[in-house]
Image (tube, rainbow, N blue to C red):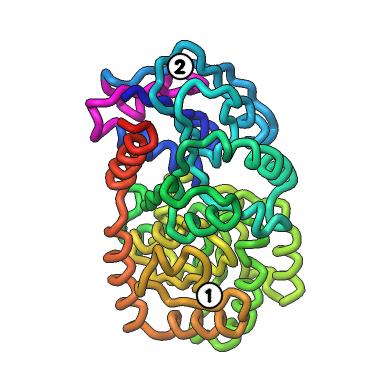
Amino acid sequence: MNIGIDARAARWYRGTGIGTYTYQLIYNINLIDKLNRYLLFLPDENISDLNPGDNIDIRLISEDRRENFWEEIDIPNILTNTGMDIYHVPQNGIGLPREKTSPFVITLHDVIPFRMPETVGPQYLKIYTKEIPEIIPLCDGIITVSEFSKQDIIKSMGFPEDKIFVTHLAAEDIYYPQNKTLCKNFVKENYKIEENFILYVGGFSPRKNITGLIQAFSKIKPKLKKKYKLVILGKKGRSYYDYRDLAYELGLKEDVIFTGYVPVEELPVFYNAASVFCYPSFYEGFGLPPLEAMACGTPTIASNVTSIPEILGDDALYIKPENIDDIAEKLLMLIEDEKLRIEMSFKGLRRSAMYNWKKTAVETINAYRQIAGK
């Protein structure tokens, strides 16, 4: 087969779930598949980190950068004279051409803009709600990242079940257990965080329920035997000031730390340095951060809704995300019970090992064959 992939997200959106997915899919396809030919649409030729084989070609595209990723990715690639048997757009189909030159497949990670529109950025919401109804009828198949998302797509889009393929994601290889003392020292020296801490990673959208996490932390802080901080990683999104002000109102100005952007290579250090990882999200199509934490051996608390129990199985401590008291109770339980933390650490390592990107790549190639009829 001759397979085309819109690879722009691997360059422009690296460090996010969709950017990581696109990069790791291409990287692992390159490792395992020497039979099919691939044409990658990229803004530059610098793909040495992918170590491309002889069966991978590059089609350069104009680097029309905008302020917002979803605006720049919404410009379709030109597919004339490519000889492709199938063309894949990994970023929820945004940027899919309207003129069909081959079978089309998209990866639709979730339907959050339809389910929880109030939690989505205005540019993305506008593009998604306008484009997706036009994109779906052009698709010969859809790849998604969980059985939960598959059922959500069927309900929301009416797309045929037998044309939706589930390929789970995985934690990247950079996430593994490291020396905790060294990691804590790094965080202390570079981020001035000296105490033990509860960690959150995963974006600032209201659906991530950072508000609930801060409120739960305020409830347990007076009960903790040792001093703990709540550390919230990530680029400060639109909701940041709401969360900061809430922390101030609850008397947690010095106890809730917003680090701002943290380079991808430093994320494993934070996971390893943390005492507990908490992910109280209201809605996930997959949810990579809990798996990343588990891969580092960090005991993990996560919501019991949407795709999360499917991905984490019996190896996380579950919370009801809408119940602040439940979040607080589970946090306190895990922090104060060393035996439970050790048990959850081993469970998490076992769970994260069930997922790997090579398997994702193999399942994706099988989906290509079925969709293209090869």
Calculate the distance from the C-alpha at mark 1 to the C-alpha at mark 2. Answer: 51 Å
Of the pair 51 and 116, the residue shown nearer to us: 116
Reply yes or no: does residue 123 show up in magenta: no
Of the pair 348 and 179, the residue shown nearer to us: 348
Label 1 or label 2, whichever lies nearer to me, is 2
Quarter location, residue 219: bottom right
**Residue at point 36%, 48% (across, down):** 172
Callout 2: 10 Å neighbours few (<14), some, many (20+)?
A: some
Callout 1: 10 Å neighbours few (<14), some, many (20+)?
A: some
Q: Quick one: quadrant of the N terminus? A: top left
Which portion, as a residue range, is magenta? 30-53
Q: Is residue 200 above or below residue 94?
A: below
Q: Which residue is mark 2?
A: 59
Query: Percent x, y for residue 69?
Result: 63, 35
* Residue 123 relative to residue 40: left or right: right
Q: Is residue 215 above or below residue 116?
A: below
**Residue at point 58%, 48% (across, down):** 261
Label total for image = 2
Query: Of marks 1 and 2, which one's residue comes earlier in the chain?
Result: 2
Residue type (three-letter) at the residue carrying disc 1: Tyr
Q: Which residue is mark 1?
A: 228
Residue type (three-letter) at the residue carrying disc 2: Arg
Query: Percent x, y for residue 318?
Result: 46, 76
Query: Percent x, y for residue 267?
Result: 45, 52
Quarter location, residue 204: bottom right
Query: Percent x, y for residue 29?
Result: 31, 34
Q: Is residue 76 above or below residue 203?
A: above
Quarter location, residue 92: top right
**Residue at point 50%, 69% (across, down):** 278
